Amino acid sequence: MDLATRRVNGYDMTYLESGDGLPLVLIHGSLCDYRYWPLQARVFNAHYHVFTLSLRHYYPERWDGRGDDFNLEQHCEDIVAFIDSLQAGPAHVVGHSRGGYLAFHLALNHPSRVRSAVLADPGGDLDRSLGEGGVDDDPAGLAPDLMLKTFERLENGDIDGALEVFIDAVNTPGSWKRSPEKFRDAARDNAYTLFGQVKEERRPYTREAAAAITVPTLIVSGANSPTPFPEIATALSKAIPGAERVVIDNASHTMNLEQPAGFNAAVLDFLQRHS
């Protein structure tokens, strides 16, 4: 796999590239970067031209959390510009967690650039049209008490303590300490992107938006993923026309790392049926 950069919307986006064929873009979630997908790229690149991205302000950039260009809209625009720069037609997109939210909005707002969309435990919130526990406003999609605890530790220089609070909340208790050291190193490299993430307004998923998606969509869940991920996956799989749903056994939120064989088989089967 080759590490490269590409000028996208005035920003030097870093990515790994491997394989040949139709383009497949892998989109990481919070605290991650292009290093998140090695267990997928080494399988998918036998069939596709795989691009694993680092979104704006993630590693290898050492961002300090300042500025106003860290947001979901900017990241969507950057991915669209990246796909266009390939000059290879629409791409399959696979997004995990926050990346799943981005993949949803790419499919919704830029269907001509998306051949198919895989949403792995997409993050965010449901509005009331999709669930009784939905929200009406535009929240950040992160519990205020969780982010307060995280920020207090970051501001005091306790990066590992901050990441333990965050990772255990979005996965399962004890996940941070059980995580491979490579994953923890990547999270440390991206810790200050949480300052940008909490400022972004993440629009809740709506029934109207989900029903408007026209590209083939697969939703992948971990059988042990914590709330709200199962609720989001269930609601979207029912609301997106023709959406498929796969649950990975013996896995939580990071199902592609915990059970890569099952995750890869499910995604590859879907991609090949829509290539």
Image: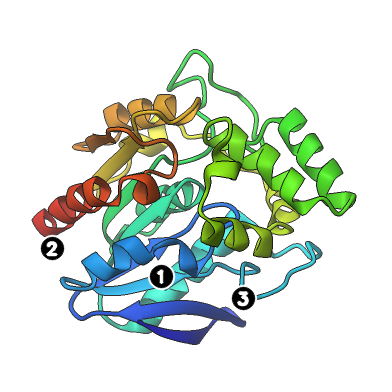
Q: Residue at x 36, y 73 (%)?
A: 51
Residue 184, compared with residue 203, is above or below; it is below
Neighbour class for label 2 at 10 Å: few (<14), some, many (≥20)?
few
Looking at the image, tell me whether mark 1 or mark 3 is earlier in sequence order.
1
Asked where in the image residue 253 lies, by quadrant, the reply is top left
In the image, residue 96 sits, relative to residue 219, either above or below, namely: below
Work out whether residue 198 can be spotted: no
Image quadrant assignment for residue 193: bottom right
State how many labels appear.
3
Q: Give left or right: position of 159 versus 261.
A: right
Disc with the residue nearer the chain's start (1 vs 2) = 1
Image quadrant occupied by the N terminus:
bottom left
**Mark 3 = which residue?**
60
Question: What residue does disc 1 label?
Answer: 52
Alpha-carbon distance for marks 3 and 2?
A: 32 Å
Which element is circle 1 on?
strand
The C terminus: image quadrant = bottom left
